Amino acid sequence: MTITDYIQQQISISPKQIDNTIQLLNEDCTIPFISRYRKEMTGNLDEVQISTIAKLKLNFEEIEKRKITILKAIDEQGQLTIELQQKIQNCYDENLLEDYYLPYKKKKKTKATIAKEQGLEPLAKIIMKQNPIRDLDELANRYLNDEVHSIEEALQGAKHIMAEWINENERVRNQLRRKFNYETVIASKIVKSKKDEENAQKFTQYFDFSEPLKRCAPHRLLAILRGENEGFLKVSVGIEKQDALQIIENTIIKSNQPELVEIMEDAIKDSYSRLLEPSLSTERLNEAKLLADKNSIQVFSNNLKQLLLAAPLGEKRILAIDPGYRSGCKIVCLDEKGDLIHNETVYPHAPQNEKQQASNKIKSLVNAYQIEAISIGNGTASRETENWIQNIPFDRNLKVFVVNEAGASIYSASKIARDEFPQYDVTVRGAVSIGRRLADPLAELVKIEPKSIGVGQYQHDVDQKLLKDELDETVMLCVNKVGVNLNTASKHLLNYVSGIGEKMAENIVNYRSENGQFSSREDLKNVPRLGGKAFQQASAFLRIPNGENPLDNSAVHPESYKLVEKMAKDLKISTQELIGNESLISQINLEKYVSEKVGLPTLKDILEELKKPGLDPRKKAVMVQFDKNIKKIEDLKTGMKLQGIINNITNFGCFVDIGIKQSGLVHISKITKEFISDVNQVVQLNQIVEVTVTEIDIERNRIQLSMVD
């Protein structure tokens, strides 16, 4: 099987599209570059399809690598037959591949290896053949020696050897595997000694729980496994034992001789209980866990994407507040570029209650630094701070935004923050992050490890490598979708640009510091170690406003500049006059510019970009109006209608910030009147919604909401 065959078995994409995509990936082209600038080669595949091909390509390569290891190990034992070699070479099922290898795998000391060392393997072979045996005791007696003292010991040792052979039987494992795939049940019970602990109450619905594993929703499975890891639940996974034993007996037992049948049944029971059942139940649970991980990671990725692409306020002078009670509200003032120009602390809330003094200070700062917007973190004392700010009589029209501050504390204590603000403490850095998130969420959030941003569930329970890889890819796709200002971007933002990476991002920032701003994309070629490949991959995602070439502030790739210049020349105008002129652009006949390398998909992209060059695909920032009378969970009443903002999305619903510390849950069944299977089809992160309070549980600090009128 070729890599193309392998990929095509799992996704319905033509062989030519797969081959060309693999070729581009082998040439170290990135997913954003391929999806945007190589549409003719891929047949217009999007970034999700290209990413899927890249992952399947990696899977195929890992399987091929594993095969080489297995073949070498068996060959070194002198047991590699042509038939076995062909079976392994033609296998692309990872479980089956390990089944083929199992009999030849080097084993630690087992009951079977001890029995073999005692010279009982010949006896096991005779019994396993199941030919009629006139006197079993007399046969066993021949194998007594200094280590085997009785017929019972000899037969028991032979059973151990046979149990291992049954475990290694490919047909047995495959038949049982099918049974496990369809009929495995997961069950959980509370660990009695932990039942009354406070943290155990999170798992009450799993205190006596049972469900077919294939029907266990990803979030339920992860919750059960978390309960087990934390010591509150005892979890079991398996199928009906008698059904399993019957399958093995039907496969293995050929004899009608009662004595032989009894020995074979004993070996089968031992093999299943000690070897097959633990192995296959673990395998099945691992498969289910992997699917749950991938599902949870995808939800996290979708949420992260929406958060990163949240509406930016843009280059405004911002006063940011990190609210607090006893420790006060940390205030910072930022200029249009997000640079810190002032910081201090005020104490408008209890116990100090210096509200008037604090209000006068805020008014003074707004005037002194020509503040255009105020950003308030949504943590402790957020509502009280927002109400206080809203009541200050400013002499200008100021917009006040409440910003999700998830991960701000992690950023403020990070090396990145220390390098940016070595002379300030964590409280000032946190407030700066809250202000910058309003101006440009993407540019600020790339500084935080994605899983710390807090827009998913069970992020600490899923496969950490899978999570990191998926979230890093999500950040990269978002950064390249928006584009990056080459002259203002931090090295953390540049790090995610197609073809750049950490070291190159540092080189770009250092070059900018030493030589001043870039005047053209061509200047990138002067950056140390930035070669032709990196330029090809990165240049079109980097923007230079007011540069020498107007196309440098667009998503048009430098390799297409001559084409655009030809379009302008054919219209008898300059490139500058063509950009943004929709009436002239509409006169261009694309067919005239089609060539072997450039087709209609790329040409259409170029025209769209010429109409609105450098357009930020993100929406504009909007404010949510929380009910001023609702400050804590005790203020809520069922039936209340409130405005809120969606701050997390899961498989089972979405969480809505209604302006108090605890977000409320809108279950998937309460999002719309119609049935939906995917929450993301209907709602988005940071979407402003109207909800109705349906249930309040003050003791457990839980709020149930509905979006259905």
Image (tube, grey):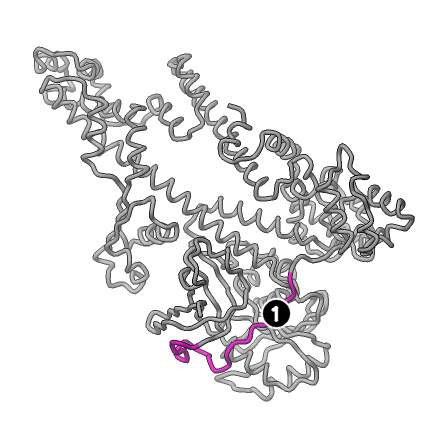
In the displayed structure image, the side of residue 240 where residue 356 appears, left or right: right
Q: Which residues are magenta?
A: 619-640
Q: Exactly how many numbered labels are in the figure?
A: 1
- Which is nearer the eye, 417 or 293? 293
Q: Amino acid at mark 1?
A: Val
Which x, y percent locates residue 625?
55, 76
Task: Give yes or no for residue 623 being in the magenta stretch.
Answer: yes
Which x, y percent locates residue 511?
77, 50
In the displayed structure image, the side of residue 518 where residue 435 appears, left or right: left
Q: Quadrant of residue 22?
A: top right
Label 1: how many Cα within 10 Å (few below 14, some 14–19, many 20+): some
Residue located beneath label 1 in the image: 622
Which x, y percent locates residue 285?
34, 41
Which x, y percent locates residue 293?
43, 47
Task: Give yes or no for residue 243 being in the magenta stretch.
Answer: no
Residue 444 seen in the current view = yes
Classify 670 as above or below 293.
below
- Dominant secondary structure of the residues highlighted in magenta in the image: loop
Asked which secondary structure carries label 1, the reply is loop
In the displayed structure image, the side of residue 406 where residue 555 appears, left or right: right
Residue in the picture at 65% in, 34% down: 24
Q: What is the quadrant of the C terminus in the image?
A: bottom left
